[in-house]
């Protein structure tokens, strides 16, 4: 993405492209359609993003950077690990409601045909989330609310639940999303991963 002070135009191009990629798929969306919907010329699209592929890459990473900014705020706040886990869960769940086009686009990119999947951008986003999630789970281990030998399993379970809700939202089977849901997810997860709890033993 070209560095420019005219971020409003670049942002509009991203928003329009994500909406079109989500509804039609990347391959079926032309640069002409994107430019027309964004109210710009095709040369302007290439000026900002270099190519259609560059636009797709930027669109995928745009959400990652926005998420990273929010996570930086969460990590900078004087919160416990439990509170941070709730904030991260709520950030993801609320974005399912606020950014439906992005998540549909991401699901198509991840699970669609190979031409729809820019692996480099997805891997970059996954690595970014690994860093943030891992730091918060490490704090949970340090505070004694997650057993050290369950650290990686807890992290996988946490991510798995968020991915599950993402898929359910896209299918229209998960319509009620609110902050108490985020709090309940973390409460239930921590009950199952406390140090000393035997498998199958009631908390």
Image (spheres, grey):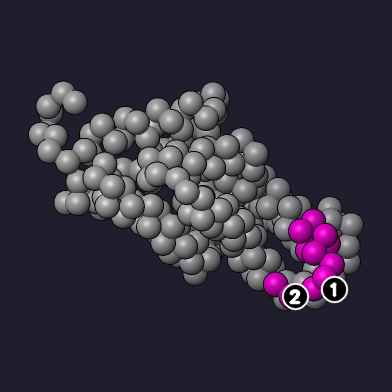
Which residue is nearer to you in this view: 164 or 77? 77
Residue farthest along the front direction in this orientation: 78
Residue 84 at x, y = what percent? 44, 45
Q: Secondary structure at mark 1?
A: helix
SS of the residue under disc 2: loop
Tell me what residue is drawn at x 16 percent, y 23 percent: 202
Q: Is 114 rendered above or below residue 152?
A: below
Residue placed most toward the observer, 140 or 20: 140
Rounded to the nearest angstrom, the CA distance separating label 1 from label 2 is: 16 Å
Q: Which sits earlier in the primary sequence, circle 1 or circle 2?
A: 2
Observer-side mark, 1 or 2, equals 2
> How packed is label 2: few (under 14 Cα within 10 Å), some, or many (20 or more)?
few
**Quick check: can you spot residue 88?**
yes
Instruction: Inspect the magenta stretch and tell me whether residue 11 lies in it.
Output: yes
Which residues make up the magenta segment? 1-12
> Which residue position holds label 2?
3
Other-residue count near label 1 (Cα within 10 Å), few / some / many at <14 / 14–19 / ≥20:
few
5 is within the stretch colored magenta: yes
On the image, the x and y values in percent for residue 185 come to 39, 32
Image side of residue 83 versus residue 116, left or right = left
The quadrant of the rendering that contains the N terminus is: bottom right
Q: Residue at coordinates 17% horizontally, 41% vertically from top-left?
A: 195
> Where is 60 relative to 164, above or below?
below
- Which of the 4 image quadrants contains residue 115? bottom right
Residue 43 has which mark? 1
Does the rendering let one see residue 156? Answer: no
Q: Answer whether labels 1 and 2 touch (C-beta < 8 Å).
A: no
């Amino acid at each position: 993405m070209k560095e420019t002070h005219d971020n409003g135009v670049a942002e509009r191009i991203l928003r329009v492209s994500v909406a079109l990629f989500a509804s039609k798929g990347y391959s079926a969306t032309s640069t002409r359609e994107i430019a027309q919907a964004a109210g710009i010329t095709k040369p302007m699209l290439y000026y900002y993003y270099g190519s259609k592929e560059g636009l797709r890459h930027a669109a995928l990473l745009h959400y990652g950077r926005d998420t990273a900014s929010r996570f930086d705020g969460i990590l900078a706040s004087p919160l416990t690990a439990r509170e941070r886990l709730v904030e991260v869960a709520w950030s993801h769940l609320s974005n399912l409601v606020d950014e439906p086009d992005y998540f549909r686009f991401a699901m198509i990119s991840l699970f669609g045909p190979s031409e729809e999947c820019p692996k480099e951008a997805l891997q970059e986003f996954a690595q970014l989330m690994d860093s943030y999630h891992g730091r918060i789970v490490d704090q949970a281990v340090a505070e004694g609310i997650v057993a050290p030998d369950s650290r990686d399993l807890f992290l996988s379970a946490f991510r798995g639940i968020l991915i599950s809700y993402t898929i359910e939202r896209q299918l229209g089977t998960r319509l009620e999303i609110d902050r108490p849901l985020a709090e309940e997810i973390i409460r239930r997860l921590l009950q199952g991963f406390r140090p000393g709890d035997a498998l199958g033993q009631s908390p």
